[in-house]
Image (cartoon, rainbow, N blue to C red):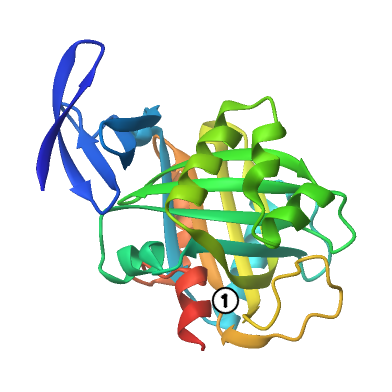
C-alpha cells in the first residue's frame, strides 16, 4: 500500500510492508525505514547511504572453498580471529509469532530485516545484539554490545532490559520486539574463515559446517545438540562502493551465480 511520510518538511512516497514501510528517496542511493507502532505513531529508524555497503553470497563446493582459502590466504590479510578451520559464530534469531521476517525473505521482498544475538564462544560475557536491514544487495547493520545476563533475559522473553540501557537503538528494539511480539526462533552455528582488506572495507568470508537447533535457545550452552542445515560452504563478499579487480579475479574462480541464500531461512526450513 502506498502512503506518504514527512522528513525535514519533505514528503516522500513510502510502501507499507506489514507494520513497516520502505521509502525510496530520489534514487536507490539512500533509504529510510519506519516502524508503525499504532495510530499515528512512527519510529524513524534508519537513514543511510545504503549504496556504500554491498553483500553478495554464493553457494560453493568444499573443493572450491579449499581453493579460495589457499588463494585468499596469500592475497588478503586474514582476520585476527582466524584459526585452522576458522572460528565459531553462533546466532540466536528472533522473529514475530507469525514469523513475519522469515515470510518476507521467502516472499522475496526487496527490503527486509533480521534481529539476532551473536556470540563467538559459549563462554562469552559480552555478546552482540544486531539488527540487519537488507535492500537488495545492499545492507545496513546496527550493533550493540550487551552483557551475558542481559542476553539471557532477552532469551527468556524479557526485553525490558533494553530500557535500562542509555542507548537509542536499544529503546527502538524494545518498541519493535514488544509491539510486534518477537520471540526467539532458532540458533544457527557455523565455522567462519574471514579475510579483510582496508580498501573499501572489503571482507571475504567462507562459512562451513552450518547447523541449527530449535530445541534450545541458550546460545551459552556448550553442549547444544544441532542438526545440519547445509552441507556445502557459503561464500560471502562484502565491500563498500566497488570490489577491487584483483579480489574480484580471486572470487571469480567460484564460477557460480550469486545466491539469495539465508542461513536463518535454511535453519527454519530444516524443521
Residue 218 picture quarter = bottom right
The residue located at (55%, 83%) in the rendering is 232
Residue drawn at (59%, 82%), measured in percent from left and top? 63
**Residue 252 higher or lower than 50, as above or below:** below
Quadrant of the rendered image containing residue 233: bottom right
- Residue wearing tag 1: 233
**Residue extending furthest toward the left:** 2
- Residue 118 percent across, percent down from the top left: 68, 56
* Lateral position of residue 37 relative to residue 26, left or right: right
Residue at image location 55% in from the left, 63% down from the top: 183
- 55 in relation to 100, above or below: above
Local crowd at mark 1 within 10 Å, few (<14), some, or many (≥20)? many
Residue located at (61% from left, 40% from top): 143
Tell me how many marks there are: 1
Disc 1, SS: loop
Expressed as whole percent of the image width and height from the top left, the position of residue 206 reads: 61, 65
Residue at the limit of the structure toward the top, as seen here: 9
Front residue of 219/155: it is 155
Q: Is residue 105 visible?
A: yes
In the rendered image of this protein, does residue 5 appear above or below residue 146?
A: above
The x, y position of residue 167, in whole percent, is 63, 27
Amino acid at each position: 500500500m502506498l502512503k506518504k511520510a514527512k522528513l525535514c518538511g519533505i514528503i516522500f512516497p513510502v510502501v507499507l510492508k506489514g507494520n513497516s514501510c520502505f521509502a525510496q528517496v530520489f534514487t536507490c542511493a539512500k533509504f529510510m525505514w519506519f516502524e508503525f507502532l499504532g495510530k499515528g505513531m512512527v519510529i524513524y529508524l534508519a537513514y543511510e547511504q545504503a549504496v556504500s555497503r554491498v553483500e553478495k553470497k554464493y553457494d560453493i563446493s568444499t573443493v572450491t572453498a579449499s581453493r579460495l582459502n589457499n588463494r585468499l590466504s596469500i592475497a588478503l590479510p586474514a582476520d585476527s580471529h582466524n584459526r585452522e578451520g576458522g572460528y565459531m559464530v553462533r546466532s540466536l534469531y528472533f522473529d514475530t509469532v507469525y514469523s513475519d521476517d522469515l515470510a518476507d525473505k521467502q516472499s522475496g521482498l526487496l527490503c527486509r530485516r533480521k534481529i539476532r544475538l551473536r556470540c563467538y564462544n559459549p563462554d562469552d560475557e559480552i555478546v552482540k545484539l544486531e539488527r540487519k536491514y537488507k535492500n537488495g544487495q545492499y545492507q545496513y547493520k546496527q550493533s550493540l554490545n550487551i552483557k551475558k545476563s542481559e542476553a539471557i533475559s532477552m532469551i527468556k522473553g524479557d526485553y525490558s532490559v533494553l530500557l535500562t540501557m542509555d542507548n537509542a537503538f536499544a529503546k527502538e528494539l524494545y518498541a519493535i520486539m514488544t509491539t510486534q511480539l518477537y520471540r526467539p526462533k532458532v540458533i544457527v552455528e557455523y565455522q567462519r574463515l574471514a579475510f579483510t582488506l582496508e580498501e573499501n572495507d572489503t571482507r571475504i568470508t567462507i562459512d562451513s559446517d552450518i547447523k541449527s537447533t530449535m530445541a534450545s535457545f541458550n546460545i551459552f550452552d556448550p553442549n547444544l545438540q544441532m542438526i545440519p542445515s547445509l552441507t556445502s560452504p557459503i561464500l560471502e563478499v562484502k565491500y563498500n562502493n566497488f570490489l577491487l579487480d584483483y579480489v574480484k579475479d580471486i572470487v571469480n574462480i567460484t564460477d557460480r551465480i550469486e545466491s539469495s541464500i539465508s542461513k536463518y531461512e535454511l535453519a527454519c526450513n530444516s524443521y
